[in-house]
Image (tube, grey):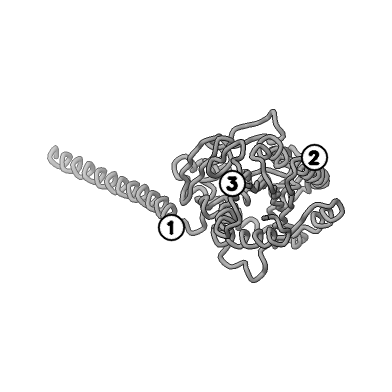
Amino acid sequence: MQGLYQRLSLMKTSVVKKVFKRIAIVLVAMVLAVVVVECSIRLIDPFGVSHFINMKRYRLDLCVARLDSVRLFAHHPDQVMELAGWEIRTDSRGFRGPERLIPKPVNTKRMVFVGDSVTFGWGVDLEDTFVHMIGEELSARGAGKWETVNAGHLFHDTTQERGVLEEDGLAYEPDVVFLVYVANDIHLTSQLLKPATERPVTFTEADLVEIENRAAVLDQLRKLDGWLPYTHRLLSFVYSNYQNAAFKERPGNEDRDPYLLDRAGIDQDEGWVLCREAMISMNEMVAKTGAVFVVLDITKHPKVEDFCAENGLLYARITHGPDEMDDIRNSHSDPHANRKGHRQYADKILQVIDDFDLVD
């Protein structure tokens, strides 16, 4: 009988070992599968979610608060940042690009470009930005020694861009200053920094539910960020796009942009007033130096065109035409212009330079 008990005990031990072994194999397989998925997303990146990884690094490592200035934040000077697929270099004033001598060398002329992420060239190397391309083209034309300065900055509205020009841009002694205008220039960054629920706006009950539900899911997904950043970003991107599509299908939402939920409570009327004041101020500042100020409109905004005409500001549209929209974006998740898109902008701006006879 004792022998039988021993055999049964051995059998139980063997079964337990097999069960634990199988559990261990399953767990190891699951971990390996998760690692493979994360590595695959990093390598293939089908929707370009590296854009979000880069954006996080940019905010944390390259930007410094400037709360004593209308700019609110600026770039750390003299930095080199290697991102997924491209690189950022800043000069001694935090602008993107090579160092430019101050005071300006004799027989040198300069163009300063002020704007947001489009001007900055988010997602592409310096050599692939329209600011750099224009400088290269002018040099190739034999139009004298022209240098371009990229004063673009992510998340800046027109009021901040005015601050950039006043505090640093004019120090480069430009002969031409271009303000690159985009539609969200009237969305004040100071208001966007506040959570949507803290902005002065009356939400519908359905909108509040939408915002809270999205925030709850995205907060849960954010727990993956530390261990699986690419998986986290891909899941968040897919979830947000699914929710946006569902939002559009609900009765009453057909003509509403789901992306504007993030901008609810932004006072665009106030933003437009301040935008106009900033453009007038920039034009006056530039005129005092003897330089030329030009507004380049990427978004084909009728208010901007009419305002510039009424106030004597040089204005030109550089919008992508309907026959130019193929393959000009960085990725599905990053709508900024890629090299091809920047080449189109450069060609249009060079035409503006010729039309306004800005190069002697």
Residue name at image x 20 percent, y 40 percent: 9
Q: Position of residue 278 (x, y in %)?
A: 78, 42
Q: Looking at the picture, tell me which residue is in the foreground, 45 or 81.
A: 81
- Residue found 59% across the figure and 40% down from its top: 105
Under tag 3, what secondary structure? Answer: helix
Q: Seen from this angle, which residue lies furthest left?
A: 3
The Cα atoms of the two marked residues, 2 and 1, are separated by 42 Å
Q: Callout 2: few (<14), some (14-19), or many (20+) C-alpha neighbours within 10 Å? A: few
Please tell me which of labels 3 and 2 falls first in the chain: 2
Q: Amino acid at mark 3?
A: Val
Q: In the rendered image, which residue does mark 1 sit on?
A: 44
Quadrant where the image shows the N terminus: top left
Does dot 1 land on a helix, a strand or a loop? helix
Three-letter amino acid code at the position of disc 2: Pro
Q: Which residue is mark 2?
A: 200
Q: Residue 171's x, y, as percent? A: 66, 37
* Distance Cα–Cα, label 1 vs label 3: 25 Å
Question: Are the residues flagged by discs 2 and 1 in contact, CB closer than 8 Å?
Answer: no
In this rendering, the label closer to the viewer, 1 or 3: 1
* Disc with the residue nearer the chain's start (2 vs 1): 1
For residue 235, the mark is: none
Q: Which SS class for mark 2?
A: loop
Crowding near the residue tagged with mark 1, few <14, some 14–19, many ≥20 C-alpha atoms within 10 Å: few
Image location (x, y in percent) of residue 289? 74, 41
Q: Residue at x 59, y 55 (%)?
A: 134
Q: Earlier in the sequence, mark 1 or mark 3?
A: 1
Q: Which residue is mark 3?
A: 217
Say whether residue 114 is visible. Answer: yes
Tell me the kind of residue under disc 1: Ile
Q: Nearer the viewer, mark 2 or mark 1?
A: 1
Query: Seen in the image, is 216 located left or right of residue 16?
Result: right
- Residue situated furthest front in the rendering: 107
